[in-house]
Image: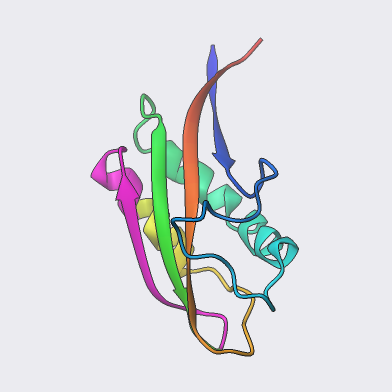
């Protein structure tokens, strides 16, 4: 029997996005982002159940407002539309660390991968 895992770059130990992506502002710690994302993981796991045979990467572009709520969320990637839409909806419900500099955009790479249960 197979089980599916949701693996994100932050949870895999890579706190910052690659250099070609927006990075976190200097006053927003990767640990604070990790904490906010951990609260989203149950919802992201539910998104995975919409298309059980799906694996792939979703890049989630989150523009965080000065109040910590997302002003804009876009999800792109190689998974079916219903999964991307679900992921974007989960990220829209999140509360994120704020920056003294004001709103910022961060790109979070989320990877759904198959994991065989032993």
Q: Is residue 84 left or right of residue 36?
A: left
Q: Which residue lies furthest to the front in this view?
A: 19
Q: In which quarter of the image is the N terminus?
A: top right
Residue lying at 45% horizontally and 59% vertically, measured from the top left: 21
Is 118 placed above or below 89 here?
A: above
Is 56 placed above or below 14 here?
A: above
Magenta residues, as a range? 67-85
Q: How many marks?
A: 0
Residue lying at 43% horizontally and 45% vertically, measured from the top left: 47
Residue lying at 74% horizontally and 62% vertically, measured from the top left: 31
Residue 117 in percent (x, y) is at: 62, 14
Is 16 placed above or below 81 here?
A: below
- The quarter of the picture where residue 102 lies is bottom right
Q: Is residue 71 found inside the magenta-colored segment of the image? A: yes
Residue 19 in percent (x, y) is at: 51, 55
Residue lying at 64% horizontally and 90% vertically, measured from the top left: 100
- The quarter of the picture where residue 37 lies is bottom right
Most foreground residue, 7 or 24: 24
Q: Is residue 8 found inside the magenta-colored segment of the image? A: no
Residue 107 in percent (x, y) is at: 46, 60
Q: In the rendered view, how is the structure colored? A: rainbow
Residue 11 in percent (x, y) is at: 66, 46
């Amino acid at each position: 029997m197979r089980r599916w895992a949701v693996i994100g770059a932050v949870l895999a130990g890579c706190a910052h996005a690659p250099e070609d992506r927006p990075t976190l502002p200097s006053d927003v710690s990767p640990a604070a982002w990790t904490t906010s994302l951990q609260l989203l993981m149950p919802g992201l796991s539910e998104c995975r159940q919409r298309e059980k045979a799906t694996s792939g990467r979703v890049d989630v572009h989150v523009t965080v407002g000065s109040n910590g709520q997302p002003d804009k969320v876009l999800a792109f990637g190689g998974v079916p539309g219903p999964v991307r839409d679900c992921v974007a909806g989960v990220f829209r419900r999140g509360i994120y660390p704020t920056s003294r500099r004001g709103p910022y955009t961060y790109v979070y790479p989320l990877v759904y991968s198959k994991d065989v249960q032993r």
